[in-house]
Image (cartoon, rainbow, N blue to C red):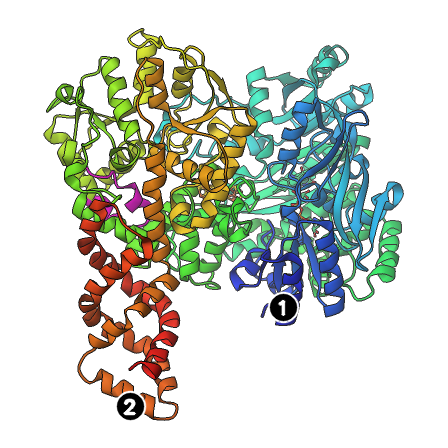
Amino acid sequence: MAAVTERAEAGLRAIVGERIRTDRVERRMYSADIGEMPRLVKPFVPAGLAGAVVRPLTEDEVIGIVRLASAEGLKLVPRGASTSGYGGVLPAEGAVVVDLSGMHKILDVDSAARTARVQPGLIWEEFERKLAPLGLALRLYPSSTPSSSVAGWLAQGGAGFGSYEYGMFKDNVASARVVLPTGEVREFSGDDLANLVADAEGITGIITEVTVMLRDLEPETHRLFAFGSATSLHAALTAVSAAGLPLWSITFLNPESTRLKKTLPHRHGHPYEETHAHYEPSLPKAFLAVIAYPSSREAAIGAALTEIAARNGGSELPPEAAAHEWEQRFSPMRLKRVGPSIIPTEVVVPLSSLAAVLREIDAKIGQPFVLEGMVGKGDRVVLLGFIPHDSRTFAFNAAFALSLTVIGIAKRYEGAAYSTGLYFRREAASVLGEDRVRRLEYFKRATDPTGLMNPNKVLGRSFIDVVMGFAATFEPLIRPIANAMKPPAVVTLKERNGIPEDVAYYAYACAQCGYCVHTCEEYSGRGWMSHSPRGKYLYLREVMEGREKFDQKMVDTFLVCTTCEVCNTRCQLQLPVEHSWMTMRGKLIQDEGRMTFPPFEMMAASLRGENNIWAGKREKRADWVPEDIAPKILEKAPVAYFAGCTASYVNTDVAEATVRLLDKAGIEFTTLGTDESCCGIPMKVSGRWDVFEEIYLHNTTEARKRGVKTIVTSCPACGLVWKELYAQLAAERGDEYEFEVKHYSEIAAEALADGRLEFDHEVNKTLTFHDSCHMGRAQGNYEPPRDLLKAIPGVKVVEMEHNREEGLCCGSVLTLIGDTPVAPILGKMRLDEAVDAGADAMIALCPCCQVQLRDAADKNDIDLPVDDLARVLMEGLGLHIESSSANSLLQWGYFEKFIYLMKPEAMADLMAALLPEMMAAMPAGMLPMMKAARAIPGGLALMSKMMPAMMPMLLPGIMPKVMPAMLREVPRRVGPLPEDMEALMPDLLPKTVDALMPNMLPLLIPHITPKMIAYIRTEL
Ligand SMILES: Cc1cc2nc3c(=O)[nH]c(=O)nc-3n(C[C@H](O)[C@H](O)[C@H](O)COP(=O)(O)OP(=O)(O)OC[C@H]3O[C@@H](n4cnc5c(N)ncnc54)[C@H](O)[C@@H]3O)c2cc1C
Ligand code: SF4
Ligand code: SF4
């Protein structure tokens, strides 16, 4: 299906500017929710591919979009975070998705009235975090708190943590502003809000503001009870309710849930996590009830709850187990990891029927059934069930009918389906009540006669309703088959359409829950789903299903991820998300030979020739070594300091301060001197794994020559490479690998602890520490740098809003190289946090973070020094080392010019300047042919068409002859180069061009062809 018409697109663009996408990939990313329908049912679903996606930032823009839609006959679909699974956000074919995630501000908090006015796209987690310093808290929140939006919950409707005390979310909304399908804005409250906006899934208008009722923030008590049967759980909950205990939240899990949880891999990714002590409670195979209440109510609840639980056969589990289960409350879908798919079902039943419902589910569902319950106000219980399955199998189609079995059971006990959306419209009367359905229908007729706003949702009928009705009617007959349709005993992993098997599995397992979206630097710098982990897994699924094929744009999208690994920590399934992109880099670039970011080819050339990425000369690598330290560096030693490229050539203060620190700590060490090579991480992340392997061999050989057993690094990426990536490669190759790896901050912190180091000079500054991703999330090193800073007299350490495991990435290296204009946006986010924390300077220990953060400060005019940890530590020891800050900016300036020069348009421009030389270098006969083409009517047009075929044949012969002219032209475009770079250019440039041309040529041809034809026409 095509995108919206050009006219409609132009109209939308006039409203939202660049915040519109009409390319097929992005439209696909916004045409999905968390649900996964069986293949046999999908064709009947009245939804398709969106016609466009727009991201308004203001209510006025929303009004503009609605008015334009009305004038152009477009359909609109409001979208929050798309964490619902009832099809509410699935666009009718060609509809425009209005993504409200950009409207996420808290507009106003009234502490006295305990209310907050917020924009629709605000995510609950962010909301709660911002309320805490004001002494306020949310009355209730869904278990999708890490990703879902305020307006999304209002429009979708539902219960959450806190519903036991506060009821449904709509009961806790004072008012909402809504842009109606007419373009008019109306403020809804009370009865109208509850009937026409709540649970209406956006069919009545787009919510642009919500006033939410809040409560006071209080310490909370969490308790965990085990019950041997559904009957005793039921009895206990009934007794709790009858006693009127003022609890805040009651949730529970079934025994299958606990059993399956034990089969899950614990953490993902890195060796340090395996050795980290994680508390894992030993939970009984029982119904587990998690109960939460404000600690101030202990007197009214504590003993009474204990007594009720005991009286009904419950036993209380230790507080640590309760705390653990409470922490896990946002991971209801974690068992999808064993699926890789799930068959979900969600119903509301009266508490009085709970035991009967649970027993009947147990009797009728013959597949593993994971169940979570949430007790709401008025004794309504929400039951969310999952059957782990495999959507890739045929059995999934039939087994899916079991979700209707559960709805049937609920209805028999005066319960109902949880929601309507796209799939359960025939349940609207039981979910919403007949009166509400009538009011909604009336309102729709009056305000939206053409069905502009979110068609096919909540009301109306289409073939899918017939299908669902048929399945519900014949459920008793289908059930035995559905129960027999088990997933395969062993889930097979197979490479599919070029997606490696482990990544293929993760892509299917990904719950699409979106926890990883807004925290992803790649996403937040751009705002489009294709850049988020969720989007990338969805895209991979599309590739596997044969609906998409990788093009260079998507290759770049996978490459540009910063490798910050926030996604690994956010994923409720604990998938090794970032590791998937690393695997894809190898697959796309190394195995399939696609184009990496062009500057990496120059780095590869520099690396192969000079062992470094900065185009410095190999013999100058150890020039940073201070004269007085040089004699102390041993020729051979068990400990080696590995400086890495950036500390050796650019931020030399890092290297100098590190060796001085080691010296002060009494450590004897060697270095690899001028034999040191780049650790290779740029080659690993750019997919040039062949070069990476060469480097591994080089560095490990040089280290062994010197008898090294322990590698000490200052650069976190070098550390990660030596600790994990070389070790992995060694294992793959069957090599021995004996190296232990430490960061200097760990060694210095040990020396501080045992008195070998003592800071005796005051540094009167307020400092904040930036956790580098490769040091923190990848290696678990958070405290030693802070311990060291705090030990310096006069230093006050303040924390940024996001720190340690949650620390924001600086926005380097891949973004800096692959999408340079986005890097300062990401850097600013980090620097702003430091300014907000009141720091005089940001301290970073990673030389590459320093380059990026200094550049971002410079580009954003932020007056905040970015200083090196080791340099500041030396100040605390009374030694001043000159900062490399200015050199950082200078060297990066050269590099950046090359990045821009290597963009296809700029390269085409460069080649156009060389057209006289190119023409002169053409093979014999070409020039007369071109002149002849010029003379024949239509000849040049024909030639223009032939260019894509001719250029790849001609260029290999032409380029060497043109190279001298190109070498003269490059400095004209990037300005004077540093002496070494200039000297190396005759070697680096031809190698870079050779490596680039096969992949870049198709991108250059559209730019260069018109210039070449113009040249033939006028100059030849
Ligand atoms: C892990 C997980 C846990 C969950 N836990 C719960 C839970 O505890 N309780 C619960 O009720 N649900 C839960 N859900 C379901 C889902 O998260 C909620 O329904 C959530 O409130 C949807 O919010 P959203 O921002 O993702 O909305 P979306 O999914 O984007 O949208 C939901 C509906 O609202 C409409 N909509 C969105 N924004 C607007 C707007 N601004 N104006 C008008 N209409 C709009 C959409 O068109 C759609 O019909 C869970 C989901 C997941 C993945
Ligand atoms: S590693 Fe960071 S930038 Fe990359 S996908 Fe994960 S969160 Fe996004
Ligand atoms: S990668 Fe993990 S956090 Fe992200 S959408 Fe998938 S399951 Fe959710």
Q: Secondary structure at mark 2?
A: helix
Residues packed near mark 1 inside 10 Å, few (<14), some (14 to 19) or many (20 plus): some
Indicate the quadrant where residue 676 lies: top left
Q: Within the magenta stretch, is there residue 401?
A: no
Residue 264, x across and y down, in percent = 47, 34
Indicate the quadrant where residue 118 lies: top right
Split into 4 quadrants, where in the image is the N terminus? bottom right
The tag on residue 97 is none
Amino acid type at mark 1: Val
Position of 204 with respect to 801 (left or right) is right
Pointer 2: what residue? Answer: 932
Disc 1 residue: CB within 8 Å of ligand 1: no
Give the magenta part as a residue range: 677-694
Split into 4 quadrants, where in the image is the C terminus? bottom left
Residue 274, x across and y down, in percent = 38, 27
Residues packed near mark 2 inside 10 Å, few (<14), some (14 to 19) or many (20 plus): few
Residue 106, x across and y down, in percent = 69, 36
Position of 392 with respect to 1013 (left or right) is right
Spatial distance from mark 1 to mark 2, Cα to Cα? 44 Å
**Mark 1 / mark 2, whichever is N-terminal:** 1
Q: Are marks 1 and 2 in contact (CB under 8 Å)?
A: no
The residue shown at (76%, 41%) is: 210
Any part of residue 851 in sight: yes
Depicted 466 relative to depicted 842: above or below:
below
Depicted 19 relative to depicted 101: above or below:
below
The tag on residue 4 is 1
The residue shown at (34%, 15%) is: 749
Q: Secondary structure at mark 1?
A: loop
